[in-house]
Image (cartoon, grey):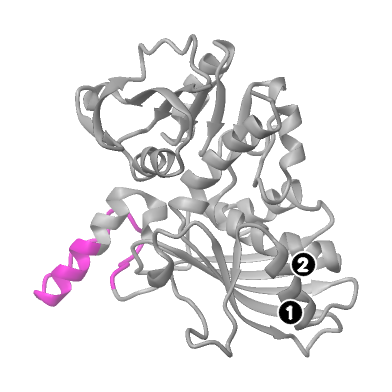
Amino acid sequence: MGYKVAVVGATGNVGREILKTLDERGFPVDEIHALASSRSAGRELSFGDKDIKVKSLDDFDFKGIDFVFSSAGGKVSAKFAPRAAEAGAVVIDNTSHFRMDPDVPLVVPEVNPEALKDFAKKNIVANPNCSTIQMMVALKPLHDVAKIKRVVVATYQSVSGGGKSAMDELFNQTRGIYANDYPTPEVHPKQIAFNCIPQIDAFMDDHMTKEEWKMVVETKKILDPKIKICASCVRVPVFVGHAEMINVEFEDEITAVQAKQAWNKAPGIQLIDLETEIEYVTPVEIAGEDNVFVSRLREDITVENGLNFWCVADNLRKGAALNAIQIAEKMIEMKLK
C-alpha cells in the first residue's frame, strides 16, 4: 500500500532534504506533491529520477492526502496545518509552532514513539528542534541506565539551521573578507564568517535565547519533566552539521563503560571510541549521515555521577527531514495510519 504525500516548504533546505530522503528510504509514495508559496509555483524539483512541479500552498486541496511534511515556518504552519489536518491528513510539522501544544505529540522515534498514540487529537505531530533531537537520541539510552538529574549543554550549530539565506551570508562574507570587502551582516546578528555568535533566535526576558529555551522545554516534554537543563547555543561558521558538548549528572551511578554498552545497543546512534583510528568526529565528517554520533566520552570527576561527551549530527537530516519521515514510518509500523 502506498501513500499520498505533500511536502510544504518544498523549495527550502529542509523541504528539498525531505524529498531526497523519502526517495532514498523507499518510503511508500503513490503520489507526491511539492508545495510552496505562489511565487515558487511552477518551479521544478527533483524526486528520485523524476522532476515534479511546485504547486501553490494557498489553494491546494489536502483531501485524500495521507501525510504532510511541513517546514515552511511557524506562521505558515499555524495557518495551513489545521486545514490539512481537518481534511484528514497527518501533519508532521518541522516548525516550533505546535511543539508545546499539550494535544500535539513531540516525537523522536528512538526516544518516545508511544507519544504518537495521541496524534488524533489534532492530527498533527511536531518534530522537535534540531539541536534537541540529537541530544535526545544520545541521552535516552543513558537515562534508561541511570536516571538523569541535570544536563549542561553547549551547542555549536551550523548556519544551515537558519536557512538558505544564512548559508549564503556565510559564503558571501567569507569570500568578501578574502577580497578585503567586509559586508554588513543581514541575516545573522553579527559577522558569522571566521566568528562564533552566542545568539540563536531572539533573547527572552530571562536573557536566554529562544533556541536555548526550546532545548529546555522540549527535553522535559520528550524525555522527563524532572530533568534540569542549562543550554548555551552558539552559531558557528559551518555549513551543515550541529555539534554539542554535553555534560550529564545522574541520580544513580554510571560508568563510561556502561554508557558505551548502552549506546552500542541503541538505535540511531554510533559511538566513536578514542582508541579507534578516527578518535572522534566533526560536523564535516558526518554531513549526509543518518545517525547521531557520540565521541570523546569521559567520566566527570567534579560530580558524583557524571559523564561528558561530544555529540554530532546532520541537522538537515536527523535534525529535521529524517526524523519527520521516521515519525511517519513509525506511525505506519504502529498501524496508526
Residue closest to the eye, 4 or 133: 4
Residue at the spot of label 2: 142
Q: Report the residue at 21% width, 30% height from top.
A: 44
Local SS, label 2: helix
Q: Where does residue 309 sit, x and y in percent of width and height?
A: 64, 77
Residue 33, image quadrant: top left
The answer to whether residue 202 is seen in the rendering is no
Name which residue type carries label 2: Leu
Q: Relative to residue 13, is residue 200 drawn left or right?
A: right
29 inside magenta stretch? no
Q: Report the residue at 71% width, 76% height from top.
A: 260
Numbered mark located on residue 307 in the image: 1
Residue closest to the eye, 173 or 16: 16
Mark 2–mark 1 Cα distance, whole angstroms, equals: 10 Å
Q: Where does residue 203 sit, x and y in percent of width and height?
A: 53, 55
The answer to whether residue 260 is seen in the rendering is yes
Local SS, label 1: strand
Q: Report the residue at 71% width, 32% height from top.
A: 334
Q: Overall secondary structure of the magenta stretch? A: loop
Name which residue type carries label 1: Leu
Contact? badges 2 and 1 (CB < 8 Å): yes
Range drawn in magenta: 171-193
Q: Which residue, as the protein is rendered here, is positioned at the far left?
A: 179
Residue 197, image quadrant: bottom left
Counting other residues with Cα less than 10 Å from the Cα at mark 2, is it few (<14), some (14-19), or many (20 or more)? many
Up-down relation of residue 318 to residue 67 (above or below): below
Up-down relation of residue 9 to residue 57 (above or below): below
Q: Where does residue 143 sit, x and y in percent of width and height?
A: 80, 63
Numbered mark located on residue 192 in the image: none
